[in-house]
Image (cartoon, rainbow, N blue to C red):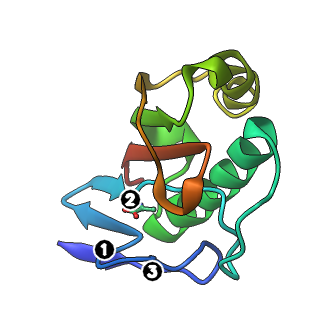
Amino acid sequence: MKKVETTKAPQAIGPYSQGIIVNNMFYSSGQIALTPEGEMVQGDVKEQTHQVFKNLQAVLEAAGASLDTVVKTTVFLKSMDDFAAMNEVYGQYFNEHKPARSCVAVAKLPKDALVEIEVVALVK
Ligand SMILES: CC(=[NH2+])C(=O)[O-]
């Protein structure tokens, strides 16, 4: 088991790792719209989803994976009213390659984020 760490994505805000590699699989923690400096992006769900993908790309790269090797994602939304807007941005990152996905609305997210996404990916 190997811990993944990068300064190109926000540091953990609790007792967890940015991600873990087990054999040839990478499991990311959920990413919210924090900058690598730890500032929350104060935008709508589209802006927040872009920052989430920047963070996911950084941790995937640090793991030796990429969006192209993601096999499963989980999307957590503060409100299902944001489903279409989130999908619009999500589809810019996953267009040809569409990993399996679950999407749920939850009562509240850390830092009052509007969206959180975690991924499972193959390490190249
Ligand atoms: C942001 C996050 N992944 C957590 O567990 O708090």
Report the front residue among 120 and 75.
Answer: 75
Name the residue type under label 2: Ser
Given contact means CB atoms under 8 Å apart, are the residues at marks 1 and 3 in contact?
no
Q: Earlier in the sequence, mark 2 or mark 1?
A: 1
Instruction: Return the residue at label 3.
Output: 5
Kindly report the distance in space between the C-alpha atoms of the residues bearing marks 2 and 1.
8 Å
Q: Quadrant of the N terminus?
A: bottom left
Kindly report the distance in space between the C-alpha atoms of the residues bearing marks 3 and 2.
11 Å
Q: Is residue 36 above or below residue 100?
A: below
Q: Quadrant of residue 46?
A: top right
Badge 1 element: loop
Q: Is residue 10 above or below residue 32?
A: below
x and y, in percent, of residue 37 in the image:
70, 82
Q: Is mark 1 within 8 Å of ligand 1?
A: yes
Q: Earlier in the sequence, mark 3 or mark 2?
A: 3
Kindly report the distance in space between the C-alpha atoms of the residues bearing marks 1 and 3.
11 Å
x and y, in percent, of residue 103 in the image:
44, 24
Name the residue type under label 3: Glu
Instruction: Return the residue at label 2.
Output: 29
Q: Residue at x 38, y 54 (%)?
A: 123
Left or right, 25 with respect to 118, comes to left
Q: Residue at x 41, y 70 (%)?
A: 18
Q: Earlier in the sequence, mark 1 or mark 3?
A: 3
Badge 2 element: loop
